[in-house]
Image (tube, rainbow, N blue to C red):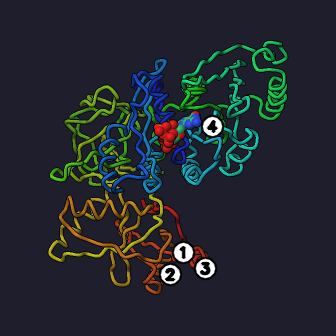
Amino acid sequence: MKFEKEINRRKTFAIISHPDAGKTTLTEKLLLFGGAIQTAGAVKSNKIKKHATSDFMEIERQRGISVATSVMTFEYEGFLINLLDTPGHKDFAEDTYRTLTAVDSVILVIDSVNGVEDQTRRLMEVCRMRDTPVIVFVNKMDRDGKNPFYLMEEIEAELKLTLHPMTWPINSGKDFKGVYNLSNKSLRLFAASTKGEEEETTFAISDLSEPILQAKIGDRDANQLREDVELIDGVYGELSNADYLSGKVAPVFFGSAVNNFGVQEMLDIFIKIAPVPRSRETSVRLLEVGEDKFSGFIFKIHANLDPKHRDRIAFLRVCSGRFERNKYFHHVRLDKDIRFSNPYSFLARSKDVIDDAYPGDVVGLFDTGSFKIGDTLTEGENFFFTGIPTFSPEIFKELVNKDPMKTKQLEKGVSQLTDEGVAQLFTQFGGNKKIIGCVGDLQFEVIQYRLLQEYGAACEFRTMPFFKACWLTSKDSKKLEDFLRFKQQNTANDKDGNPVYLAQSEWFLNTEISTNPDIQFHFTNEVHR
Ligand code: G4P
């Protein structure tokens, strides 16, 4: 394998969680371990604050921060770790889903008090689509959380994931005494001082019947831990790396991110077991990560903050070979060779131009409009990466042009914003209405604001009664044509001209599915790529 050394030292991952579970806090602790930041509080939360003066102004501010923290790269124990940031706000979930296509594994943070929450479920669905390996970090053990066995049961049932405990907590909340590390058989004591600092001590306890255990945590807790560990050993045995790597089993750690407790245990195991960049499926063949020739895809596009400059940054994930500055690469969709003289590095210390990058790395490319999400770059071969789907929006609104003199600008703006992935555009069959679909309401504000600011085009939105878009295919083109004609009010073309059914409710959707057996309804656009 040509770049074996570089590939085998890279770990590219994302931290995902329901808002407030502790993603930002954990990110910061990991960066502290990696030496990428020196002080706590250096990582800006990318959450949209609840009481922001104006939502979209806050979004503009966040856009500034989030380019800088989009990819955080640090070194730890000889590994080069690329941590890809995901937006905290649920209205930007689509952005998170796309980022998940560019990572090799994830760490899922769960709040021990709240357990599995809405966003956790949806994010895990996306991980499951690609069998992404998952490590679970149960956070906030310093608060009175759920019983760990119940919590494990809840996570397994709700997320359809088999868990494997790597550490085990001794109580929670005020009584939280620490964790027992089941793999290296050591006890790590937790003691949060009143000043908010913590003292930690680690003891090797290979045999839990040793009296040192009582001495450290008292009789009652020692007995409970012995019982718990006996049960866990009986049920779980050794972690199978293969099961973790295939996404079937998720190792679980317990801790408290804000107290930096249990984080290092997780990081140390993470670098041992988390996958290095792997081979990926393409439209024509399996692309081996160790191939000599470069390939990569665009998973995110970020617009410039300055409305006078329309250039954008396209985020490229390198999948094979070596990306090189100033070398011509093939843009498959446009069938055009292009080169990049100023590729942007996200290395935490230097936002510099980089000369090369390897599989697992993310490179920022200045773009004047040639990229769309999912675009592939190669050294000449024609294929595209699969597994970068677009999901159905959840809110649909008709786009109404408020200024007919600016129709061209509006069209251009909408086209560029949808290329960026801010929203999806559909054109209704009956009446040619332009319909914008988003995951959250906030995005409509962003679109309206940006169309006016950046393109001088005024628009408003009219709510439409749809809740889901399904992409349609059929072996019988006549049947599909008839369906599209008869259901004009509920059918549209997506931006690439693919037919879509816009469902008013689950009931309508199920009825159409059962009465049209020759038509396939797909919940992502992957089928058309
Ligand atoms: P997020 O990125 O997942 O949205 O969560 P974030 O890290 O911002 O954490 C949400 C809140 O939970 C923060 O408090 C944070 O301090 C707190 N937190 C994180 N880890 C722990 C933990 O282990 N124990 C406890 N008790 N709290 C934790 P906040 O009040 O919302 O913000 P801040 O003012 O503390 O920054």
Instruction: Estimate how packed mark 4 is, as few (under 14), some (14 to 19) or many (20 or more) residues with alpha carbons within 10 Å.
Output: many
- Residue occupied by mark 4: 138
Instruction: Estimate how packed mark 1 is, as few (under 14), some (14 to 19) or many (20 or more) residues with alpha carbons within 10 Å.
Output: some
**Reading the chain from its start, which is encountered first: label 4 or label 2?**
4
- Residue occupied by mark 1: 519
Q: Is residue 23 left or right of residue 418?
A: right
Give the farthest residue toward the front.
194
What distance separates the C-alpha of mark 4 from that of mark 2? 50 Å
Instruction: Estimate how packed mark 3 is, as few (under 14), some (14 to 19) or many (20 or more) residues with alpha carbons within 10 Å.
Output: few
Q: Are marks 1 and 2 in contact (CB under 8 Å)?
A: yes
- Residue occupied by mark 3: 511
Q: Residue at x 46, y 31 (%)?
A: 28
Residue closest to the eye, 341 or 60: 60
Q: Is residue 10 above or below residue 365?
A: above
Q: Residue at x 27, y 35 (%)?
A: 344
What distance separates the C-alpha of mark 2 from that of mark 3? 16 Å
**Reading the chain from its start, which is encountered first: label 1 or label 3?**
3
What quarter of the picture does the C terminus occupy? bottom left
Element on which disc 3 rests: helix
Mark whose residue sits in front, 1 or 3? 3
What distance separates the C-alpha of mark 3 from that of mark 4? 41 Å
Mark whose residue sits in front, 2 or 3? 3
Element on which disc 2 rests: helix
Residue 355 figure quarter: top left
Q: Position of residue 82 (x, y in %)?
A: 43, 32
Question: Which mark is on residue 479?
Answer: 2
